[in-house]
Amino acid sequence: MEILEKAKHVTAIEMDPRMAAEVIKRVQGTPEQRKLEVVIGDFVKVDMPYFEVCISNTPYQISSPLVFKLLSHRPLFRVAILMFQREFALRLVARPGTALWSRLSANVQLYAKVDNIINVARNDFRPPPQVESSVIRMVPLDPPPPVKFEEFDGMNRIIFSRPNKTVRANFQAKGVMKMLEQNRKTWLALQDMPVDDDRSINTIVDEVLAELEQTENRASKMDIDDLLKMLSAFHEVGIHFS
């Protein structure tokens, strides 16, 4: 009700018809009724209207899909205030060089500024859940970086796969080089470019990492700029990740 009092219009997306009916019941006959639209459905699957602010007490099982659906939404929204399980929230806001910096952290922070607003104890709920929660603020970068998400995520999937291993070791993991070699051949064919390089894919990858001085580094130490430079360097030699 407090949100309705302050906002010009609220679209509430609720999967549980009983909860949706309760929300509608609370505003019937009040001045706020005309400002509320209730959509019954799965947030991850429904088409979202234009909005400026998103506020969500997020079901923990859809935390990651919800975040990336918001970040892919156009036009860009102004801010999202989201409550998550604390473990997930801490990974969202983690910084390079910390133990929690991960593929999730990097993928989200490529597109948005995220920070923790407040921690919420389990005893603040009735009945109390099994986990602690945190509320985070997410502000999308405007304009968003001109980077194909599937490429950035594909590279991060490799280098963050084993956090305690070096970047080179993760590229040497079983199946990775074969996949990259096939991706490179496919990309060159689509560009009508011959595969006239007799170097092995292992050699090409090693040379890129050496040029960037990242061979013995770990993904946990790499910031967004480091990751973007690496992706660009691989693209220059025809190596793609999606």
Image (spheres, rainbow, N blue to C red):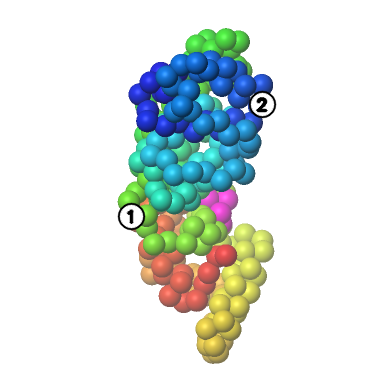
Q: Amino acid at mark 1?
A: Pro
Q: Which residue: 56% across, 77% down?
A: 187
Q: Nearer the viewer, residue 172 or 16?
A: 16
Q: Nearer the viewer, residue 126 or 167?
A: 126
Q: CA distance from mark 1 to mark 2?
A: 37 Å
Residue 236: % across, % down: 43, 75
Residue matched to label 2: 17
Where does the N terminus fall, quadrant-wise?
top left
Residue 143 image label: 1
Q: Helix, strand or loop at disc 2?
A: helix
Answer with mark 1 or mark 2, whichever residue precedes in sequence: 2
Q: State which mark lies toward you, 1 or 2.
A: 2
Q: Which residue: 47% across, 49% down?
A: 73
- Residue 2 seen by the camera: yes
Label 2 neighbour load within 10 Å: few <14, some 14-19, many 20+? few
Which quadrant of the view contains residue 129? Answer: top right
Q: Nearer the viewer, residue 61 or 70?
A: 70
Q: Which residue: 40% across, 36% down?
A: 53
Residue most extreme to the front: 29
Q: Amino acid at mark 2?
A: Pro
| Left or right placement of residue 179 versus residue 148 in this view | right
Q: Which residues are magenta?
A: 157-161
Residue 242: % across, % down: 57, 65
Residue 188: % across, % down: 55, 82
